[in-house]
Amino acid sequence: MSISNDKWIWWKDGVIYQIYPRSFYDSNGDGIGDIRGIIEKIDYLEYLGIDAVWLSPINRSPMDDFGYDIKDYRRIESIFGTEADFDELIKTFHAKNIKIIFDLVMNHTSSSHLWFVESRSSKTNPKRDWYIWQKRRQGKYPNNWRAAFGGRAWEYDKITGEYYLHSFLKQQPDINWRNKELRDAVFDDIKFWLDRGIDGFRLDVVNWFIKDEKLRNNPYTIGYSPRIYDMQNHIYDRNRPETHDVLKDFRKLLDSYPERMSVGEVFSPPPGDPRLSSEFLGNGKDQLDMAFDFSLMYVKWNAKAFYKKISNWLDLIPAEGWPCHVLSNHDQPRQASRFYKKNYTDERCRILAVLLLTLKGTPFVYYGEEIGMRDGKISRSKLRDPLGKKYWPFFKGRDPERTPMQWENAENGGFTTGVPWLPVNSDYWKRNVYKQIEDKNSLLNLYRFLILLRRKEYNLRRGSIVFVETGEAGILSYMRGCEFEIALNFDNRIKQYFPQGHDAEIVYSSEKFSKVTESKILQPYEAVILRHNQHRNS
């Protein structure tokens, strides 16, 4: 075991597991996952070995965007449970030393939020400037900005005869972070949850917070898709420099509470923008604790491409900052579907598991990835996501990656006794939690092994990372500290690999009869973790 006196920091040393509450486990048979369902599955989460859960929004909401349109920041949405249920969740999880991370949606509210109801009631209302209102300009829209979910970003409101800004749905008006009273009110809501025991926050679309003060038109460019929104260069409606001032104030608030953390969704379209994400870390101590880089969600299956994305991201982290890594979430296709390869998808999932849990930085695991869940196949009539409904069949929305967790070979995969809010994947009978728990060689038990190994070994958590093979021959390999060597064969052909030294022992191999001498034969899609004995306990 590698040894260090460095203090354990849960959000650096631990593994964070994202739960999409609607789809995790339904405790009351209404077809929607809920807080009690999460509580009832705590033994599973403890078995898996994770250290924290990130909950997608459970605040009161009309569900126009399934929780990312908040009506009341301080109340729990009734479909998920009661305030008492949530208090029990915090108490139960903290008793098991599992932290709770809340999804913090601070770019916009629901149009039914009382703040907006007041703001739209009159041009002279005290909360009028809490949102972004504009008159027509020369008889037209205030500017050329488009909404990320389609259409114009401006909605005309008959009550006062002006337009309000919405970067997403019209039911999601953007708040005005330039207004100090609004900022104080949002921070008061954040304090409310910190006082209630929340351990950290994931900040939704953090790079959208501040808009150009003059509301200038975005210039047009060649986009990654022909959609009008994607053919604008979004220099005025997101990524504004003043956002960093907001985050510095937020960090001061967060640091006034012990052992709290933040991670930000810094959205960027394909192929990703790690430099932009790194900017939201500031100097590593004054803005976000961590920020997501989406590059690995957009990359193709290629060892060299993976190396370039990962090394570039790590190089951009400030000296006092800390990286994190994510391969899937509630807005992007699942990794098993993105990297589908006939007869080899499960092997690729093993490579991804080893990669995610041995890189330097905090791993985020999306629910179901540990059993290799695929995107669901959902008919148009059963789509729930407003994006899927709007753009079908060109884009089927985000429902496929949000299908219910597959617990067992039972009706609805054991997710609910009722009618599930989204169809359960048809492969639940062969790909489910209970079946994989019983199989010591399953993907689930690989995740468990890697999580426990990472917890035990300092060099897998905090050790330096030095790349050895950079993908030229289809192999990605790297050292963690001087102790662990990870080799990943991204190819479906046998490869010869030369470890860094002659004293290595195999800690893990995806091949049952794998062995190492002066050279190592890597089988197709083999993942190997080696330990160099001369550097143990260093």
Image (cartoon, grey):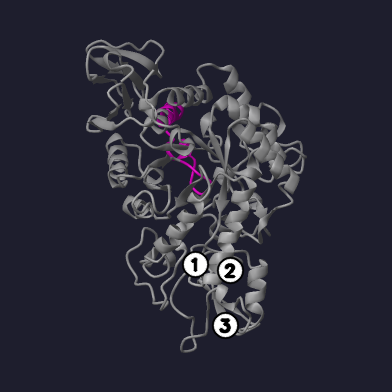
User: In what element is the residue under mark 2?
Assistant: loop
Residue underneath mark 3: 162
Span highlighted in magenta in the image: 328-353
**Residue 380 lies in the magenta-colored region:** no
Residue underneath mark 2: 170
User: Looking at this rendering, what residue extends furthest in the bottom direction?
Assistant: 138
Rendered position, 319 above or below 355: below
Residue 407 in view of the camera: no
Q: Quadrant of the N terminus?
A: top left
**Residue 329 lies in the magenta-colored region:** yes
Which numbered dot is residue 147? 1
Look at label 2 and name its amino acid: Lys
| Residue 221 position by quadrant | bottom left
| Residue 124 position by quadrant | bottom right
Q: Residues within 10 Å of mark 1 (few under 14, many from 20)?
A: some
Q: CA distance from mark 2 to mark 3?
A: 14 Å
Q: Residues within 10 Å of mark 2 (few under 14, many from 20)?
A: many
Q: Are marks 1 and 3 in contact (CB under 8 Å)?
A: no
Q: Earlier in the sequence, mark 1 or mark 3?
A: 1
Look at label 1 and name its amino acid: Ala
Percent x, y for residue 347?
42, 26
Q: Earlier in the sequence, mark 2 or mark 1?
A: 1
Q: Are marks 2 and 1 in contact (CB under 8 Å)?
A: yes
Rendered position, 187 above or below 299: below
Look at label 3 and name its amino acid: Glu
Q: Residues within 10 Å of mark 3 (few under 14, many from 20)?
A: some
User: In what element is the residue under mark 3?
Assistant: strand
